[in-house]
Amino acid sequence: MPAPAAPIRLGAPTPYITSHGSKVARLHMYDWIVLVLLAVLDGILNIIEPFHRFVGSDMMTDLRYPMKDNTVPFWAVPIIGIIGPMIIITAIYFKRRNVYDLHHAILGLLFSVLITAVLTDAIKDGVGRPRPDFFWRCFPDGKP
């Protein structure tokens, strides 16, 4: 007679790592190193001089969009993109007490933010296209 099958267990693995996260962080040391390298790369991309594209009179018609204030204030982007999700992740951690999930959620959030920043800054530096309201920034009175 065959042995009975083990019951199917749903959810997270049962031996939670509920102590402190140093063991989990050590297991993912290379992930943290890559994260630091991405942050350094983004810092370098913000420092280097971008490509300067020549703006001729034929391009000026495409760059005459009206100058407007920011739609989203600059201080709101980190709050919405990083601090808000961190608060939600931490609240879920306090409910579930799973250091493993907390660590992976923080790593995933930081990786997504830094990869987006590196790709965006690299493309902006490489292309060097002026802003759509370039004309009005250079000539606020409207006379070239």
Image (cartoon, helix red, strand yellow):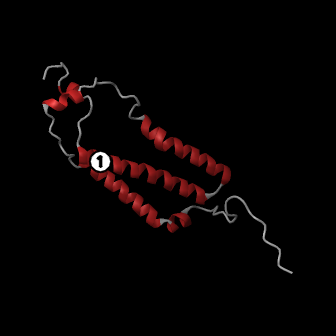
Q: Residue at x 19, y 46 (%)?
A: 51
Marks counted in the figure total 1
Q: Is residue 113 left or right of residue 139?
A: right
> Farthest residue in the front direction?
58
Q: Position of residue 16 (x, y in %)?
A: 66, 63
**Looking at numbered disc 1 in the image, what kind of residue is underneath it?**
Ile
**Front one among 2 and 39:** 2
Q: Position of residue 55 (x, y in %)?
A: 16, 35
Q: Residue at x 20, y 27 (%)?
A: 61
Q: Residue at x 44, y 66 (%)?
A: 30
- Label 1: how many residues lie within 10 Å, few (<14), some (14-19) or many (20+)? some
Above or below 97: residue 64: above
> Farthest residue in the bottom direction?
1
In terms of secondary structure, where does tag 1 sit?
helix
Q: Is residue 5 left or right of residue 73?
A: right
Q: Residue at x 64, y 50 (%)?
A: 94
Q: Which quarter shows the C terminus?
A: top left
Q: Position of residue 44 (x, y in %)?
A: 28, 52
Above or below 88: residue 65: above
Q: Which quarter shows the N terminus?
A: bottom right
Q: Which residue is mark 1?
A: 123
Indicate the quadrant where residue 136 lies: top left
Indicate the quadrant where residue 59 lies: top left
> Farthest residue in the right direction?
1
**Front one among 23 and 35:** 35
Above or below 69: residue 12: below
**Front one among 91 and 71:** 71
Q: Position of residue 65 (x, y in %)?
A: 27, 25
